[in-house]
Image: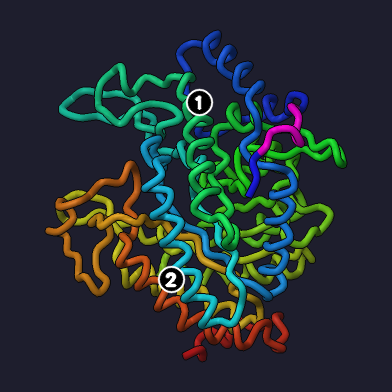
Amino acid sequence: MRFPPARIQPSAEHHWRSLPAAQQPVWPDAAALDHVLRELSSYPGLVTAEDCDRLTSRMAEVARGEAFLLQGGSCAETFADSSADRVGALAALLSDMADVVAEASSLPVVTVARMAGQYAKPRSQQNETRDGVSLPAYRGDAVNGREFTPAARTPDPVRLLESHRSATTALSHLRVVRHGRSDVFVSHEGLLLDYESALTRTDPRGGRRYAASGHMLWIGERTRDLAGAHLAYFADIANPVAVKLGPSATPGMVVSLANRLDPHREPGRLTFIARMGADKVRDVLPALVMAAESSGSPVSWVCDPMHGNTVVSPSGRKTREFSSVMEEVRGFFEVHRALGTHAGGVHAELCADDVTECTGGLQRISDADLARRYETACDPRLNAAQAREFAARLSELARVNGNDRRLETPWRGIPSLLREVP
């Protein structure tokens, strides 16, 4: 995997700035932000256009039912996660999981890490209050610090430069640990549009513009406004892109997203990541899949079984029960089997450490155990043992999925069959 800067050059300003942009930090010093963005624009891109195109080709295999996507990593990546040990451990864990799924499904696995860019997070509240003191919410290391102090919580644009440095370090370590092996691509939520725009480059081969911050970027549930700045920016880049779809998504929205982000119906260009919750996936997902089929867009469908199953434990910590996570994955596969479409992959928040953030699994982690090693910077992750158990159970579902590929059953009028899936 190569990461030279020469093949992608800085592009012109993007038109997204004239549109409403959700979940952007309130930077206190506009002049400081402008200075940082001009400096960031002079930095080398983190990935090449060639590698982004290669991932698009791999995602086209997923869309055709010829491959399976495994995407995973921390909810909120920290700058400390760019160390050689942490990068190597996550890459090894994802590789182990991919091997299990590939063997069971008889399909090649496309491995994509939430790495080298997942430094920013959307938040439901602008501020956090403790003991009567209100400060800006922690929005990821790219924006501010986790410490609950006025100095740490004040958004600092210099952190955008540190994001680039940390990503560069992580990618260098990833290149070493993956030398001579199959590729691991990197991805993150394209949340901070100032950062993404400053790292957008034009490929001289064909004049297309790429987000040079990562191979694949996605739009989150909170920022997929059809009239918003994120859609405008994503429509302008040539990377493979994804959109998170929660239970409020509608068939009309799916068609509109496909028309906006994949107007040329390019295989591998667009992925929909369903994050419905175990109790809603069987009811909501079928109509969305059918809408995508009717649009003619060759999308990949991926299951995020984490976000829709987040609960607050009796001890007051956010957590996810392992059985609920697996139930959503099971429902996701059932829907696609009934519709005759391809369950293309999973997108999970996990880490290679022995944390205690999600309950259940063979370790039988309880609410009382959460305090032992609850280390996430934002949302709870599967630990290494739970991630391996997740892969083992996933392989059972993928085995059937891989053997059947795309079924011959016509997709129209199929939802009634969902109740008959074992």
Question: x and y percent of residue 243 in the render?
Answer: 60, 52
Side (left or right) of 375 relative to 239: left
**Which residue sits at x=57%, y=40%?**
190
The disc label shown at residue 160, or none = 1
- Is residue 7 one of those drawn in magenta? yes
Q: Is residue 282 something one can see in this rendering?
A: no
Question: x and y percent of residue 218 in the render?
Answer: 59, 48
Question: x and y percent of residue 57 in the render?
Answer: 73, 60
Of residues 225 and 367, the one drawn nearer to the viewer in this rendering: 367
Question: x and y percent of residue 359 in the render?
Answer: 24, 64
Q: Is the stretch drawn in magenta largely helix, strand or loop?
A: loop
The disc label shown at residue 95, or none = none
Q: Are marks 2 and 1 in contact (CB under 8 Å)?
A: no
Q: Is residue 250 something one can see in this rendering?
A: yes
- Is residue 110 one of those drawn in magenta? no
The span shown in magenta is 4-10
Which secondary structure lies at badge 2? Answer: helix
First in residue order: circle 2 vs circle 1 = 1
Of residues 29 and 94, the one drawn nearer to the viewer in this rendering: 94
Examine the image and state in which quarter residue 348 appears: bottom left
Side (left or right) of 137 relative to 236: left
In the image, residue 254 sits, relative to residue 285, either above or below, namely: above
Of residues 337 and 211, the one drawn nearer to the viewer in this rendering: 211
Mark 1 is surrounded, within 10 Å at the Cα level, by few (under 14), some (14 to 19) or many (20 or more) other residues, namely many
Examine the image and state in which quarter residue 68 appears: bottom right
Kind of residue sitting beneath label 2: Glu
The residue that label 2 is drawn on is 328
In the image, residue 360 sits, relative to residue 135, either above or below, namely: below
Mark 2 is surrounded, within 10 Å at the Cα level, by few (under 14), some (14 to 19) or many (20 or more) other residues, namely many
Which secondary structure lies at badge 1? Answer: helix
Which colour assignment does the render follow?
rainbow
